[in-house]
Image: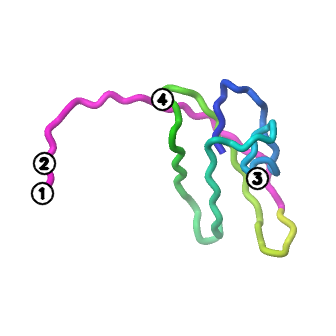
Amino acid sequence: MILDESRELGVPSATQLKNSLNKENQMAKHYVKFIFDTSVVTSFNATFNELSLDKSYTLYFITSNEIPFDYATLSPVQSRACTTKTYSMKSTNAYFL
């Protein structure tokens, strides 16, 4: 889940993250859920659409052992600060065959 830092709501709990909720139990605008076996998949990419340019966000994430019919153990909440960037692109001619 990625949240706009300017809202300063605080850190959501692992259960809130699992349910795509922010600290105030409101549905997050930007979230991605991945389900995979970490013994097979060791890295992945996440894409968040409709973020504002030149803005700071906090990415929150957890891991769990979502085995069917088993109690889910959730990891502590992890976070990373990130900022969207604006890049200027010069106009060029492009030819496609």
Please indicate whether residue 4 sits to the left or right of residue 50 in the image: right
Farthest residue in the right direction? 71
Cα gap from disc 4 to disc 3, whole angstroms? 27 Å
Comes first in the chain, label 2 or label 4? 4
Farthest residue in the front direction? 26
Location of the C terminus (image quadrant):
bottom left
| Relative height, residue 49 to residue 7 (above, below) | below
Comes first in the chain, label 4 or label 3? 3
Cα gap from disc 2 to disc 1, whole angstroms? 7 Å
Magenta region, main secondary structure = loop
Cα gap from disc 2 to disc 3, whole angstroms? 46 Å
Contact? badges 4 and 3 (CB < 8 Å): no
Label 3: how many residues lie within 10 Å, few (<14), some (14-19) or many (20+)? some
Q: In which quarter of the image is residue 92?
A: top left
Residue holding disc 1 = 97
Residue holding disc 4 = 53
Q: Going 76% across and 67% down the picture, which residue do you hit?
A: 66
* Residue 19 numbered mark, or none: 3
Contact? badges 4 and 1 (CB < 8 Å): no
Question: Could you say whether the residue bearing mark 3 is in a helix, strand or loop?
Answer: loop
Q: Quadrant of residue 5?
A: top right
Residue holding disc 2 = 95
Q: Does the magenta stretch include residue 69?
A: no
What's the residue type where badge 3 is placed? Asn
| Relative height, residue 24 to residue 62 (above, below) | above
Q: Going 58% across and 28% down the picture, which residue do you hit?
A: 56
Comes first in the chain, label 1 or label 3? 3
What's the residue type where badge 2 is placed? Tyr
Which residues, given as a range, are shown in magenta? 73-97
Name the foreground residue: 29 vs 35.
Answer: 29
Please indicate whether residue 23 sits to the left or right of residue 87 in the image: right
